[in-house]
Amino acid sequence: MAAAPEQASVPVAAAPSGKWIVAVAVMLATVMEVLDSTIANVSLLHIRGSLSADVDEATWVLTSYIVANGIMIPLTGWCSAYFGRKRFFNFCILLFVGSSLAAGAAPTLTVLVIFRVLQGLGGGAMMPLSQAILMETFPPEEQAMAMAVWGLGMMVAPVMGPMLGGWITDNYSWRWIFYINVPTGLVASIMVAAYVHDPAYIRKQVQRIDWWGLGYLVLGVASLQIMLDRGERLDWFNSHVIIWLTVIGVAALIFFTVRELRVAEPIVNLQVLGNRDFAVGTFFTTLIMFAMYSTFVLIPLFCQQIAGYTPLLAGKVLSIQSLGTFLSILIAGRLFNLIDPRLLVALGCVMAGLGTTYMADFYAQIDFWNIAIPGLLRGIGSGFIFIPITTLTLGAVPREQMGAAASLFNMVRTVGGSVGIAILVALLSSNAQIHQSYLSGHVDAFRLSALAGAPGIGASVLRAGPEHFLGMIYLEMQRQASVLSFIDDFRLLAFIFFALTPIIFLMRRPARGGAIAGGH
């Protein structure tokens, strides 16, 4: 990227009302994209039945979107420099709207997957672009509040997606989970065209396309995303397919890194990692996403598989966590310029760690509030973490590098969440087998025989047969083994939160007014 003149670090001028109109415009687009990343999950069985697909084929509706998303995110900075940020952002919104309309009308699974890929390509750029636009539209002293408002949608949308998708599918048709994007996207596009303006230094800076770098990036990200998505089904590294995907993905990303550090006009500007605060913040956020996003999968699984909750009740458990996030984001945005924001992040890590520690006491017959209260603590912690860490990390970068920094930041954040979900779900399965083996070794056949003859139980055994009684014992043993494996995951996540707490102080404290000391 070409160096910008010194005055480029001055924020884009905007009227007080204009700044918030810009915030609403970019939030509409980004919330639409984040919502769509989870809304199709609960509709998968309906999509499968409607389009006559088997389970593995139907999962490509989710995988295709994730892979395309992962490829586009790191390309956002380069595309912004080549096409112009406003023009590219609006193109992505319209691409997302058009592909959503086509996906809803898809007559076959193949057509649906093709348009989900286009959706992922359009949606992948929205989050880093919206962050970059907000960070440049608002002056440093207001950036934390702007990111707090933006963060409300980012936190609530992943939780609301499954609930909204289930309600739409039950009451209308799965096709409407895509059609609802059309009016929202068109409104966002009109507002972006009217109110968003590129800074003076955003111009066509790139003259050549680094085709080799682009090829390595696409191959590496696609291979690793497919590996993470398919690993559990194919038994991970016992599968030759998973081994080859891993080797190809890692090798391609190594070649990509070497290429991007040497080429004059890189697809992804890795030089921004030379900024210490940005590098530390990016590393910290990757591990936080590993720990935080995993619970969005583990909690619904525990509620439905172990506690016997309905999908709607499991969604209500997550909504309590969202309430905590909502409250803490508002507080964090106001406190950012009043106290050391690193203290807010450390407080958030401790609260999230405590909430996850309480989750290690879960049991099979647990009631609603004993699941929801630890989630509330985690939600409060997440709000204190994400807004300050995002503002600290991106605020440390010169504005002319904001597009590249935001795209790289969001890429590793997405990778951290994907890797966390894949690893913890795999541990859930393997640890359950270990615990089941341990529990079965402590089952005493003589005590079971005595129990079968006990008053009240003996009669039921005679009626149902000893085999039925032993089957009940085996099913309960499986459930308890699953509970223990969930507890193992929760303990690991609690350790990650507590271990990350001191790392935040490797970042420099921002100077008064919001800029990082030495960052601009």
Image (cartoon, rainbow, N blue to C red):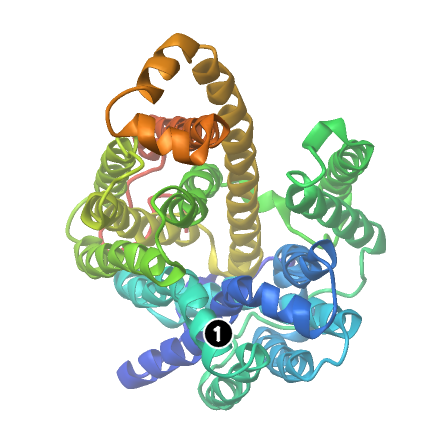
Residues 151 and 15: in front is 151
Quadrant where the N terminus sits is: bottom right
Instruction: Give left or right: position of 408 versus 17.
Output: right
Can the viewer see residue 489 in this picture? no
Instruction: Give left or right: position of 25 versus 76.
Output: left
Q: Is residue 87 above or below residue 451?
A: below
Q: Is residue 505 above or below residue 190?
A: above
Q: Is residue 182 above or below residue 244?
A: below
Report x, y in % for residue 366: 25, 41
Could you tell me which residue is drawn at 44 percent across and 86 percent down? 195
Residues 423 and 370: in front is 370
Could you tell me which residue is drawn at 22 percent across and 51 percent down? 512
Report x, y in % for residue 200: 53, 75
Residues 166 and 208: in front is 166
Report x, y in % for residue 141: 26, 62
Instruction: Give left or right: position of 94 versus 8.
Output: right
Report x, y in % for residue 412: 55, 46
Q: Element type at marker 1?
A: helix
Q: Which residue carries the number 1 mark?
A: 32
Instruction: Give left or right: position of 409 versus 144.
Output: right
The quarter holding residue 13 reads bottom left
Q: Total marks drawn? A: 1
Residue type highlighted by circle 1: Met
Can the viewer see residue 317 in this picture? yes
The quarter holding residue 361 reads top left
Could you tell me which residue is drawn at 51 percent across and 59 percent down? 402
